[in-house]
Image: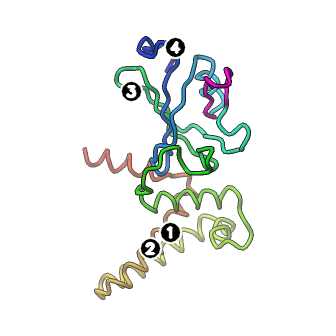
Amino acid sequence: MNFKDFQLDKTGDGLLPVIVQDACTLKVLMLGYMNEEAFEKTAAEGRVTFWSRSKGRLWTKGETSGNFLTVKEMYADCDADTLLIKAIPAGPTCHRGTTACFDTPEDEGFIRTLARVIRGRHEQMPEGSYTTKLFVKGVKAIAKKVGEETAETVIEAVDGKRDRFIYECSDLLYHLLVLCEQMDVSIEDLEKELALRHR
């Protein structure tokens, strides 16, 4: 993807509108603008950089706060006049300290949020965290735990105990997310695989 491939005659100022979306939760985080230099810097460094119209210079999101936006994927829209960036935010995106600049409901579901928390535990390995202890033990121990939780979930399903099934199924999902993180597999990877099967 090249900046020169975009059709910028509609904007009149030569700037490319950029929508940033959380790659995990799919929540729309913000809108910014890029010139060619900002686009190239973003593509080269993997951190979202805009052209600040108010400052009149390049502006890497998070350069002051540390709340960088790490690029996962970039897509041009059908008219080649807008860019969508799926990114991993390092913290709140909005200057107000909120997750996003848009006050939309937090309706993307908790599982993606949990997956992001697990990724944070894996990166930071905080002491005293159960998740940290699992990562320290390694893939065999995590996989064993997934097996145990699977068996417990099956038992509750066969016994017809709905409340206990929900409880054990939640344990299973959590440990499966930990195993996915250990294996560097995202929810998006699983969705892509399932979508291929659906077709």
Of marks 2 and 4, the one in the foreground: 4
Q: For the point 44% across and 30% down, which residue is it?
A: 75
Give the labeled residue for mark 1.
174
| Residue type beneath disc 2 | Ser
Residue nearest the observer in this picture, 8 or 144: 8
What quarter of the picture does the C terminus occupy? top left
Crowding around mark 4 (Cα neighbors within 10 Å: few <14, some 14 to 19, many 20+) is: few
Query: How far apart are the two marked residues, 3 and 2, measured between alpha carbons?
Result: 37 Å
Considering only order in the chain, which callout, 2 or 3, is on the residue closer to the N terminus?
Answer: 3
Labels 4 & 1 near each other (Cβ < 8 A): no
Circle 2 packing at 10 Å, graded few (<14), some (14-19), many (20+), is some
> Which of the two discs, 4 and 3, labels the residue nearer the N terminus?
4
Name the secondary structure under disc 4. Answer: loop
Using the image, determine if residue 176 lies above or below residue 79.
below
Task: Estimate the spatial distance between the alpha carbons at disc 4 and disc 1, rounded to whole Å.
Answer: 48 Å
Which residue matches tag 3?
Answer: 77
Residue 193 in the image: above or below residue 152? above
Please say whether residue 58 is one of the residues in the magenta stretch.
yes
Decide: marks 1, 2 in contact (CB < 8 A)? Answer: yes
Give the amino acid type for the residue marked by disc 4 in the picture: Asp
Q: Which residues are magenta?
A: 47-59
Residue 8 appears left or right of 184: left
Measuring from the top left, give residue 82's x and y in whole percent. Answer: 44, 25
